[in-house]
């Protein structure tokens, strides 16, 4: 071989080897191997505070699609906005393995569409199936048939990694235990959950909060303490959803009014209403 051609061949080989170091070992197909590259859930959650701080509440909304309500044999699938997220993976069992619903708060002031835009970025490394805005807007980011990246390390119904078998719903709220959840938001969430619970044959025993399935326990606080599960239950039932099933957490004993301090004049303490102090979730 001519010395110049030999030199060029050696240089070409060195360039090829260097390229393999950047992109992976070339297989017989000539395409880089995906071994070692991230292919699935990185174990993050949308309500992680370092993630929530990255959400721009004024970001432009791009690529959103309006979807009309869809009639079904049960409650209709509500009208919503579709903003697709690539942060998903195929459920091993498909839609037949949807066994539970996990409720989250967003820990952000952003509305549902901006949360959806954040989930649409691969760099966010998080997603949920649905987002519920304070104004009642519903956004779908991941189809039910796929798993979204919403729960992180978790365990529920005796199974690890709740992403595999749950629907994740993000509820727009600061998550500071005082930011209100408007009635409009409860009603929109109720319509969505009525559709999901009937379609996938779920009752209230498999509706859970992120804080109760994330581990180690105490890692999460969503949904916040002022989230009213009874308001949600009423909204679900009003939308044609089920009322059966107790939420899978112990109900604390009713709050007992303290004895009044002795006084000269007799005082009458009104009896608490039947639901006073009752929660379906344990106090944190």
Image: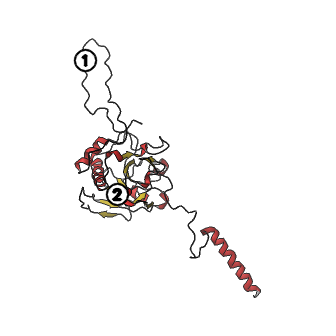
Is residue 220 visible in the rendered structure shown here? yes
Q: Quadrant of residue 163?
A: bottom left
Determine the CA span between mark 2 and mark 1.
Answer: 52 Å
Q: Residue furthest top?
A: 264
Q: Position of residue 131 (x, y in %)?
A: 36, 54
**Tag 2 secondary structure:** strand
Q: Residue furthest bottom?
A: 2
In percent of the image, x 34 and y 45: which residue is there?
205
Mark 2 packing: few (<14 Cα in 10 Å), some, or many (20+)?
many
Q: Name the side, left or right, on which 187 lies relative to 41.
A: left
Q: Circles 2 and 1: CB distance less than 8 Å?
A: no
Compared with residue 234, is residue 260 higher up or lower down, i.e. above or below?
Answer: above
Front-most of residues 190 and 116: 190
Q: Name the side, left or right, on which 199 lies relative to 151.
A: left
Q: Work out which quarter of the rendered image holds the N terminus and state it.
A: bottom right
Q: Work out which quarter of the rendered image holds the C terminus and state it.
A: top left
Residue at mark 2: 139
Front-most of residues 207 and 228: 207
Is residue 170 visible in the rendered structure shown here? no
| Colouring | secondary structure
**Tag 1 secondary structure:** loop
Residue at mark 1: 267
Q: Position of residue 274 (x, y in %)?
A: 25, 32
Mark 1 packing: few (<14 Cα in 10 Å), some, or many (20+)?
few
In percent of the image, x 48 and y 43: which residue is there?
219
Query: Can you tell which mark lies on residue 143?
Result: none
In percent of the image, x 22 and y 48: which residue is there?
238
Compared with residue 81, is residue 281 higher up or lower down, i.e. above or below?
Answer: above
Front-most of residues 185 and 216: 216
Q: Position of residue 126 (x, y in %)?
A: 46, 55
Q: Earlier in the sequence, mark 2 or mark 1?
A: 2
């Amino acid at each position: 071989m001519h010395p110049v051609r030999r030199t060029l061949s050696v240089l070409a080989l060195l360039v090829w080897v260097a390229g393999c170091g950047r992109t992976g070992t070339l297989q017989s197909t000539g395409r880089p191997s995906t071994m070692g590259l991230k292919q699935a859930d990185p174990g993050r959650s949308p309500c992680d505070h370092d993630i929530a701080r990255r959400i721009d509440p004024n970001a432009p909304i791009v690529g959103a699609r309006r979807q009309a309500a869809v009639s079904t044999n049960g409650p209709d699938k509500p009208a919503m906005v579709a903003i697709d997220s690539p942060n998903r993976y195929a459920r091993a069992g498909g839609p037949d393995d949807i066994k539970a619903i996990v409720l989250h708060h967003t820990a952000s002031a952003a509305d549902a569409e901006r949360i959806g835009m954040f989930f649409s970025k691969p760099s966010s490394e998080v997603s949920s199936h649905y987002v519920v805005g304070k104004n009642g807007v519903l956004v779908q980011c991941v189809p039910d048939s796929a798993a979204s990246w919403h729960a992180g390390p978790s365990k529920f119904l005796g199974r690890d990694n709740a992403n595999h078998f749950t629907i994740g719903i993000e509820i727009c709220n600061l998550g500071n235990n005082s930011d209100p959840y408007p009635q409009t938001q409860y009603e929109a969430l109720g319509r969505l959950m009525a559709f999901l619970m009937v379609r996938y044959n779920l009752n209230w025993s498999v509706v859970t909060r992120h804080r109760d399935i994330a581990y180690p326990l105490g890692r999460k606080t969503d949904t916040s303490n002022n989230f009213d599960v009874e308001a949600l239950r009423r909204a679900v039932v009003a939308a044609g959803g089920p009322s059966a099933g107790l939420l899978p957490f112990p109900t604390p004993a009713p709050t007992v009014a303290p004895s009044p301090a002795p006084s000269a004049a007799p005082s009458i303490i009104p009896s608490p209403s039947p639901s006073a102090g009752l929660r379906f979730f344990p106090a944190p």
